[in-house]
Amino acid sequence: MLNIHQIPVLSDNYIYLLHDTDSNQTAVVDPALAEPVLEKLNALGLSLTYILNTHHHSDHIGGNATLKKVTACQIVAAESDHNRIPQIDIPLKEGDSFQLGSATATVIATDGHTLGHIVFWFKAANALFCGDTLFAMGCGRLFEGSAEQMWHSLNKLAVLPSNTQIYCAHEYTENNGYFALSIDPKNADLKARMQHVKQQRQQGLATVPFSLAEELATNPFLNAKTYLEFAEIRQQKDNFVN
Ligand code: ZN
Ligand code: FE
């Protein structure tokens, strides 16, 4: 069985610790920082086997070097990012699978936010670690890829089982929701979701993970019919002031 622990760091990042109880192997997804991960490992009595990186941004790999030095773990990341993510031990590409003990992840390439962005889908655990590709009611900014690439990437995620739980790397939900409402104000699912999200945030609670089904009902980026429509919405979001 795969146990998942969420570690909030910086202003709005989430790091995830994955523990396969069958093998006792442990992975950390996108360690922005090392210290909070070492503390959590310590508290849980776990030792780190792997770092999984979704992409090269510093708020996703900032803890890599220290964690590798302290724990001798292996770094798992996109083959194509070998010049930007130091010390990759296990390079991966679209369609590869990765074993965390008895838990299998399928690697899906999701160019858009960056080129070389990958996500890890643990099918049996119903869990998707998607970095900065898909957010609750939003998606990552286009720093390197085109709108067409990001639209294709989101479409690959949209067809996963709708009960998939999505573990993204940032708590951007509330702000994303205000934007989504601005372009889809009559969406009853969206209005209900935002009410709940506002309550959660007032109580300081995480709104992540969430289900793909919720996204399909409320995420304007995931529902764009063409990449041109997607591009238009993405541009509006880039200029959106809440
Ligand atoms: Zn990023
Ligand atoms: Fe990020």
Image (cartoon, rainbow, N blue to C red):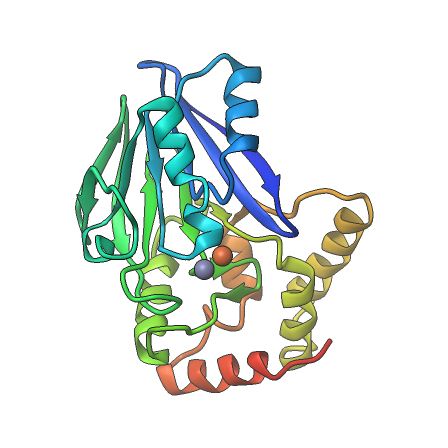
Q: Position of residue 56 (x, y in %)?
A: 36, 55
At x 41%, y 31%, the residue is 67
Question: In the image shown, does 164 or 238 lie closer to the viewer?
Answer: 238
- Numbered label tally: 0
Q: Is residue 5 visible?
A: no
Quadrant location of ligand 1?
bottom left
* Residue 93, placed above or below residue 165: below
Question: In the image shown, does 95 or 78 lie closer to the viewer?
Answer: 78
Quadrant in which residue 153 is drawn: bottom left
* Residue 34, placed above or below residue 84: above
Please give left or right for residue 72 compared with residue 134 in the image.
left
Q: Position of residue 53 (x, y in %)?
A: 35, 45
At x 51%, y 30%, the residue is 37
* Residue 119, placed above or below residue 46: below
At x 63%, y 58%, the residue is 173
Quadrant in which residue 81 is drawn: bottom left
Q: Position of residue 71 (x, y in %)?
A: 37, 23
At x 36%, y 54%, the residue is 55
Please give left or right for residue 233 compared with residue 225 in the image.
right
Q: Position of residue 30 (x, y in %)?
A: 43, 44
